[in-house]
Amino acid sequence: MRGISKSNPKLLVIRMSSLGDIILTAPVFRNLKARWPAAGVDILVKPQFLDAVSKNAFIDKALAFTGFFGAVRAINAGGYDAIIDLHSTLRSRLLCLAARVPVVRYRKASLARRLFVNFRIPSPALEKHTLDRYLETLSRLGVPVLHAGPELGDWSRSASALTLKPGPLKICLLQTAFLGDCVLTLPLLKELRETLPRARVSVVTRPETAEIFSSSGLAAEIIEDGKKTAPSGPGEFFGLARELSSRGFDAAIIPHRSLRSAALAWRAGIPVRIGFSSSAGSLLLTHKVPFSWLLHDVERNLALLSPFSSVLKAAWPGMRGDAGAASRLSLPPGIKAGINAGSAWPTKRWPREKWARLIKLLHAGYGGKVLMAGGPGEKDWNDAIARLAGPGRVLNLTGKTSMAELMEAIRPLKVFVSNDSGPMHIASALGVPAVGIFGPTTRELGFFPYGPANRVVETQLACRPCALHGSRKCPRGHFLCMRLLTVEEVFTAAVQACKLQETT
C-alpha cells in the first residue's frame, strides 16, 4: 500500500516479542503520532509484554495475543485502516491475511543472517540495524521519519507522578557497580540536584569509585559500601542497611539493577525506592521505570527521575580539579594523547601488537609520549605493549595512580583511546575526546562514550554482542570482532574526534 488518506487513521502494529525488539519499536510510534497526532495507534503483543508496552507514551492500546483466531477477531473488530507488521513471521503474515486489512511489513533479512552465520556469506542487508528497517516501513505509509532513534520521553508513563513531603528532603543514590557505571551516573546526580534543589543527596558507592562522585561536588556525603573487601558479606550488608536507616532517607534512587541494591534500600526502610523494571530486585521497588537497551546509559539513568519531572536533560557536571593529585603526578610536558589498553574482560582487549602500532602513530602525530592508563591487574599486559611500542614513546602509569590522579592525568589530553571500560567514560566526563574500541560489546547496549565529539570503532558481525560485559574467550573461537579492527581506522577516529572537539 502507499499512504493513508484519512486525517486520523486507526493503526495496529504487530510486534509480539521479544521485549528488546518491542522496546526498539518506540521511534515508530513516535513518528506515527507526529504524522497523525489524533490517530489511534495500538500494538499486538504477547501477554507477558502488556505491562511494558503500556508505559509507552505513544501507544493508545495494547492487545494481548492469546491465540490465532482470537487475535483475528480482535483485529477485525478494531476497525483498523492499516496494519504495520514489524514481526514478519509466518504467524503474523497469516494473521494479516485473515484480518482483511491493508498491510505494510518490514524486511527482516532473516535469510541473509542465516547465510552469514552458517557460511560467512556477507550481505549489504546485514549492515542495516533492525531499527532502520522498522523506520523504512513507515515510508510506505507516507510517514516522514522525524525521530530516528530512541528518546528519553518514549516511556514517560514509566512511573506514576510522585510528590514527596514538603520541606527538606534526604535522598540516597545507590550506585555500587563498576567504574564506568559510576561515571555514567554523574548526569543523573546533576539533574537530581537541579530537579529537587531542596534535597540533600547522599551517594552510596564503593571505596574505589568514591572519588568519582566527590569530584563532582554534587553529593552532600559519600557513604562507602565495602561489599568487595569486607570480611563478611552479610555483615557488611546489614551494617550498611542500619547506617542508611539511621539517616532517615525519604527516597532511594537505584540505577544499579542488582538484587542487593534493591534489598539494601528495602532493608533500610526507605519508603520510596525507584529503580528499573528489569532490576533483579524489582519486587522490592515502589516505583519501576522501564529499561531500554537502546538508550545510552546516561539517558537510561536519567529516566529514573521521571516520577519527579517530565523534562529531563543530559549533561556532564563540572568535575573539580585536584591540585594535589596533579602535583603528585609530575607529568612531563607535551603529552597530548592517552590510551587505556586493558580491561577486566580479555575479549574486550584489542590485540597488543595493534595497540603498539597505534602508539607509534599517536606519538608521531601528536608529539610527546603517549600516556598509558591501567589498573594493577593490567600491568603485565600494558608492559608488553610498551615494549612492543619501543623506547621513548610511552609514559606507563599502569597501577601507579589513585582515582584522583588518573582523572588529573586524563584531564589535559587532546584525545583518549580506550577499550570499552571505565577510563573511557572518565575521559568523556572530563570533556576529552574519547574513542572507544568495541569488540564483544556494541554501542547499542548503551555504554559508548557519551558526547558529540566521541567515536566508536567496531565491525559489524552477526555474533556481536556475545555478552553484556565481555567474556574470558571468544565463544566462536575466531575473535574477529577485535582482529578485524585496523590500526589505521582507530587512528583516523582519534584524529576526527580531536578535530571535532576543536570546532565545537
Image (cartoon, rainbow, N blue to C red):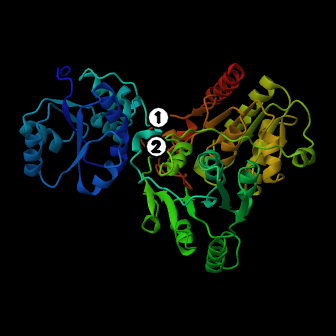
Residue 76's tag is none
- 117 relative position to 220: left or right: left
Total numbered circles? 2
Residue 184 in sight here: yes
Residue beneath the point at 75% across and 27% down:
361
Residue 464's tag is 2
- 34 relative position to 251: left or right: left
Residue 324, percent from left and from top? 91, 48
> Please, what is the three-letter code of the amino acid marked with disc 1?
Gln
Residue 10, percent from left and from top? 18, 33
Residue beneath the point at 72% across and 21% down:
502
Between 296 and 458, the residue placed more toward the observer is 296
Considering every residue shown, the one lying at the far front of the view is 166
The quarter of the rendered structure image containing the C terminus is: top right
Look at the numbered discs 1 and 2 and tell me whether their residues touch, using CB distance below 8 Å. Answer: yes
Residue 421, percent from left and from top? 64, 47
Q: Quadrant of residue 57?
A: top left
Residue 387 in sight here: no
Label 1: which secondary element: loop
- 259 relative position to 318: left or right: left
Label 2: which secondary element: loop
Q: Quadrant of residue 168?
A: bottom right
The quarter of the rendered structure image containing the N terminus is: top left
- The residue pinned by badge 1 equals 460
How crowded pointer 1 is (Cα within 10 Å; few <14, some 14-19, many 20+) is rated as: some
Residue beneath the point at 78% across and 36% down:
389
How crowded pointer 2 is (Cα within 10 Å; few <14, some 14-19, many 20+) is rated as: some
> Please, what is the three-letter code of the amino acid marked with disc 2?
Arg
**Is residue 168 positioned above or below 393 on the image?**
below
